[in-house]
Amino acid sequence: MRQFTLGDFDFALPPELIAQHPAAERSGSRLLDGTGDLPVDRGFRDFPGLLRAGDLLVFNDTQVLKARLFGEKPTGGKLELLVERVLTGNEVVAHMKVSKKPPVGTELRMDGGFSATLLGRWPQEDGPLFRFAFSSEPHALMLQHGHVPLPPYITHTDTAEDAQRYQTVFAKHPGAIAAPTAALHFDEGVLAGLEARGVRRASVTLHVGAGTFQPVKTENLAEHRMHSEWYEVPEATQQAIADLRARGGRLVAVGTTTVRTLESWAATGRSRGDTDIFITPGFQFRQVDLLLTNFHLPKSTLLMLVSAFTGYAHMMALYRHAVEHHYRFFSYGDAMLLARRPASD
């Protein structure tokens, strides 16, 4: 097996291909069918026709929080919090963007009239996350005063459109600060088409963290440390997968977050908890047969995951095709469908 380095996952992407806004309709995006040896250009509404009766489609039903909050220090210095996780007792864990870190115990004045008291770093003293105590219930405060945490490559400030479209139609469990973007393409029409075809549905939960955009900085992939995210595979989904295997159907994961959830469960036997699984070429997949995903950043852990799933050479050929044919990239961009291929690179 070839030993891959960070540079293997770089590619040239014209900036104009980075989608800044969603398609006019959720299912109006394009779909690159990469299940065969050669790419096929389709529309997303063709997706139900690519599946079979008895296949199981697994979604991530996490809900994106309005996790970006603005405020100031007692000195008047501006700051920004990005809530990564809600704890108990009105406490949260957040990234803090500020010119100079305030001392522990500082009460920050947040836009909207509430306060956030800095309690220290979390979970390690040298880590990037901080623990805060909000003056009232965090979910309610974020809903009222927060902003949609758009990815760093989307350049506009969040709007009412983003509040609706950077959220899946089946979002159920609040906790993510990035959307499971492959699922953003689904609307009621596509879901009805899947049901009519006899495709079954199940869900998992993985609360996507800011680490999904964390760049890999080491050329040696083994030195990269993944961020940790909370996941759950409900009993109903476990049973649905057992039934699927009994009838010989295919498990179709919607998004890399669903893949990470299912493969974490398969690897550990734990149906809920934290995962820092890092999937690179050579990984032995145990759950997923087909993967619906968006296009990912150069040198990203997600590009490494999809390359592990469908083969590095095939994956990079699909990306070259997507660039040449002006597909729209990243969270608000187009989708691709991949089949699991035996590791051969």
Image (spheres, grey):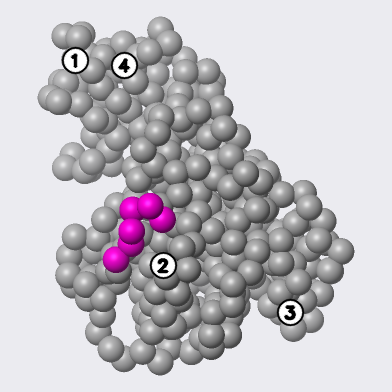
Q: CA distance from mark 2 to mark 1?
A: 42 Å
Which residue is the site of mark 2?
323
Please, which residue is most extreme toward the left here? 100
Mark 4, secondary structure of its residue? strand
Q: CA distance from mark 4 to mark 1?
A: 9 Å
The residue under the point 44% across, 83% down is: 314
Q: CA distance from mark 4 to mark 3?
A: 51 Å
The foreground one among 337 and 4 is: 337
Residue 32 appears in the rendering: yes
- Category of crowding for the residue at label 2, using alpha-carbon neighbours closer than 10 angstroms: few (below 14), some (14–19), many (at least 20): some
What span is colored magenta in the figure?
12-17
Q: Which mark is residue 249?
A: 3
The foreground one among 25 and 201 is: 25
- Category of crowding for the residue at label 1, using alpha-carbon neighbours closer than 10 angstroms: few (below 14), some (14–19), many (at least 20): few
Q: Is residue 304 magenta?
A: no
Which residue is the site of mark 4?
71
Give the answer, above or below, for where 307 lies relative to 232.
below
Identify the image quadrant of the C terminus. bottom left
Amino acid under disc 1: Gly
Q: Nearer the viewer, mark 2 or mark 3?
A: 2
The residue under the point 66% across, 61% down is: 44
Residue 161 position within the rendered picture, expressed as x and y whole percent measured from the top left: 57, 32
Mark 3, secondary structure of its residue? loop
Q: CA distance from mark 2 to mark 3?
A: 33 Å
- Category of crowding for the residue at label 3, using alpha-carbon neighbours closer than 10 angstroms: few (below 14), some (14–19), many (at least 20): some
Give the answer, above or below, for where 211 lies relative to 90.
below
Residue 342 position within the rendered picture, expressed as x and y whole percent measured from the top left: 48, 89
- Residue 163 lies left or right of residue 116; in this view the side is right
Q: Quadrant of residue 84?
A: top left
Which residue is the site of mark 1?
77
Residue 65 position within the rendered picture, expressed as x and y whole percent measured from the top left: 50, 34
